[in-house]
Amino acid sequence: MTSATPALTQTTQRLQSIDALRGLVILFMLLDHVRETFFLHHQVGDPMNIDTTEPGLFASRTLAHLCAPVFVLLTGLSAWLYGEKHQGQGAAAVFLFKRGLFLVALEFTLVNFAWTFQLPPSVIYLQVIWAIGLSMIALSLLVWLPRPALVALGLVIVAGHNLLDGLHFGPESALHVPWAILHDRGWLVVSEDLRLRTSYPVLPWIGVIALGYGLGPWFGRGSDARERQQRLLLTGAAALLGFAVLRMINGYGEAPWSGYPTATQTLMSVFNITKYPPSLLFLALTLGIGLLVLRGFERAGSARWISTLAVFGAAPMFFYLLHLYVLKLLYLACVALFGLNQGDYFGFDGIGAVWLVALLLAIALYLPVRSFARLKARRRDIAWLKYL
């Protein structure tokens, strides 16, 4: 019993750190979606306009940049752990394919309706859930590659896809639809009454999910915690160093930064990077930070705040759907009570209110998310729960 206790503790810390990191980026996502709901009259571009974006808004949006890369990376990592638990790549491939299809269907239905409240929809935004779903379907095929080949492919996609930035195909081309889905963000006209917006081109995300799957053996049963943490430190630091070097020389794959009258604006320009599709520098910065935070969370052990973050990360899809509908209903209630106060939008006067509402919503949603996470852990006999 004495020798078993440390192993159990290390296993708990290893898996809880993953949920905690997922929970952290979920809270950043909540902040960004509160911004998109109540601060849309101060919309930001991609990359942002430094001359017109206040530092508080810039910082809020930049924090949200961590969400998709970290979540997709952890999706790949979790897929490897699922395969380890269920004896092999076959189980992981089947789960990835089925859950990927489920997420794609979810994007077209419950997720899009939560954003638009429009039936039938005139526009369907193919966003992060769509991108994760297609990435999971792609990974269901890639898991059969040898791990070195899979990691190499992921690196080639992440590092090399910016070479394709100048490649475009018009609506008359047979490649217009697949290229809009893979790399060239745009509009797809289905009919006079329906358009699709490929907000999240999926090719770079396939590279990220492949890299996440490649991390799996670092977290496998019997893996050494010190060795894992050393690898996370070196890999995260290398990614950040690569970002710094390429950014300082205004290198490949990103709009150049420039000096401004103030140090704050100059710093904003340096970190003003492209998300749609995510550039190499975007992914180097966000994944580098994510890996270092993951290491820090594991080293933090059983701290209370780690457990709290892990609650949000244990039921991510439930939280995602719940917070979208809560935000939409809050917005409609505010418009009904107070009217439109920002032209076509109801909105707050300052970014501080966005942070306050995000904090209050995180507190309010904690208990229902914890209850669902406990149900999910307790009722493993209910197959559909694992998809949430």
Image (spheres, rainbow, N blue to C red):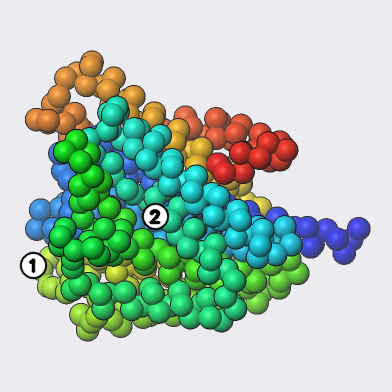
Q: In the displayed structure, would residue 305 be above or below residue 156?
A: above
Q: Secondary structure at mark 1?
A: loop
Could you say where residue 157 lies in the image, as x and y percent from the top left? 39, 74
Q: Quadrant of residue 226?
A: bottom right
Q: Tell me which label, 1 or 2, sits earlier in the chain.
A: 2
The amino acid type of the residue labelled 2 equals Ala
- Label 2 environment density (alpha carbons within 10 Å; few <14, some 14–19, many ≥20): many
Residue 256 sits above or below residue 125 on the image: below
326 with respect to 116 (left or right): right
Marks 1 and 2, how far apart in space?
A: 39 Å
Quick one: which residue is furthest to the right in this view? 1
- The residue tagged 1 is 261
In this orientation, does residue 163 appear? yes
Q: Quadrant of residue 208?
A: bottom left
Q: Is residue 72 left or right of residue 225?
A: left
Q: Residue at x 12, y 73 (%)?
A: 259
**Residue occupied by mark 2:** 131
Q: Amino acid at mark 1?
A: Pro
Q: What residue is drawn where x is 16% and y is 58%?
A: 171
* In-image side of 248 versus 226 (left or right): left
Question: In the image, what residue occupies the spot 20% across and 41% down?
Answer: 191
- Choose between 60 and 305: the one closer to the eye: 60
Q: Nearer the viewer, mark 1 or mark 2?
A: 2
Q: Is residue 117 above or below residue 77?
A: above
Give the structural element (helix, strand or loop) at label 2. helix
